[in-house]
Amino acid sequence: MSTLIFLSETLETPVGTLILLTDGQDRLRALDWVDYEERMLRLLRSQYRQPAAIKPRAGAPSAASHAMRAYFAGDLSAIDGLVTETGGTDFQRAVWKALRDIPAGQTVSYGALAAAIGKPKAVRAVGAANGANPVGVVVPCHRVIGSNASLTGYGGGLERKRWLLAHESAPHR
């Protein structure tokens, strides 16, 4: 079994420092906040189930870094075409694909997301897949809210979720 190599870089944002992990093809593999680094590493171990090494990125910043800078500077569409590569189950990847279909400035409920993937009764499983998303913000799990428009859990903390939704002018309570 070969070892996965992830290239690490950090990015200062208005709501904390992000860690970006890309691969040799410059695909975004993981993104999380520095204060949630252990969570990110747990997700990587559970999704890939093979040895991985994280090395500092040398040279020019990744495409993900450029896109995230633009996003935080106000170009909300800068992350739309960013190439990601994830592990996870087929179900998780279906949820993550559906998350990318939620435009900036909009929110959906867990129930609506479950219906969008053709599994209307799988609301809790959709919530679990949402929580296991390794590339938050780019795969916008923060755009999923409660059925009554309330903020619900977010791996980076509810204050960051609130900030991201306000940054995108998305409705929430």
Image: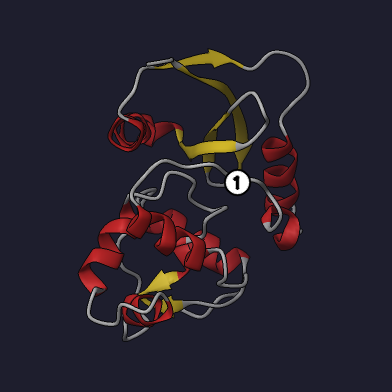
> Could you tell me if residue 71 is visible in this image?
yes
Please indicate whether residue 72 sits to the left or right of residue 23 in the image.
right
Residue 97 percent coordinates (x, y):
50, 61
Question: Looking at the picture, does residue 78 appear above or below residue 103?
Answer: above
Q: Amino acid at mark 1?
A: Pro
Residue furthest bottom in the image: 148
Which residue is painted at 36% across and 82% down in the image?
115
Q: Is residue 123 above or below residue 82?
A: below
Identify the image quadrant of residue 94.
bottom left
Residue 20 lies left or right of residue 43; in this view the side is right
Q: Is residue 74 visible?
A: no
User: Could you tell me which residue is drawn at 56 percent across and 63 percent down?
Assistant: 100
Dot 1: what SS? loop
Residue 108 x, y percent position in the rendering: 44, 79
Location of the C terminus by quadrant is: bottom left
Q: Nearer the viewer, residue 56 or 2?
A: 2
The residue pinned by badge 1 equals: 14
- At 78% from the left and 21% from the top, the residue drawn is 60
Looking at the image, residue 46 sits to the left or right of residue 102; the answer is left
x 61%, y 64%: residue: 167
| In the image, farthest residue toward the front | 1
Q: Position of residue 49 (x, y in %)?
A: 30, 28
Q: Position of residue 95 (x, y in %)?
A: 41, 63
Does residue 90 lie above or below 16 as drawn?
A: below
Instruction: Name which quarter of the figure residue 64 lies in.
Output: top right
Q: Nearer the viewer, residue 103 or 18?
A: 103
Q: How many marks?
A: 1
Q: Quadrant where the N terminus lies?
A: top left
Q: Closer to the camera, 84 or 56?
A: 84
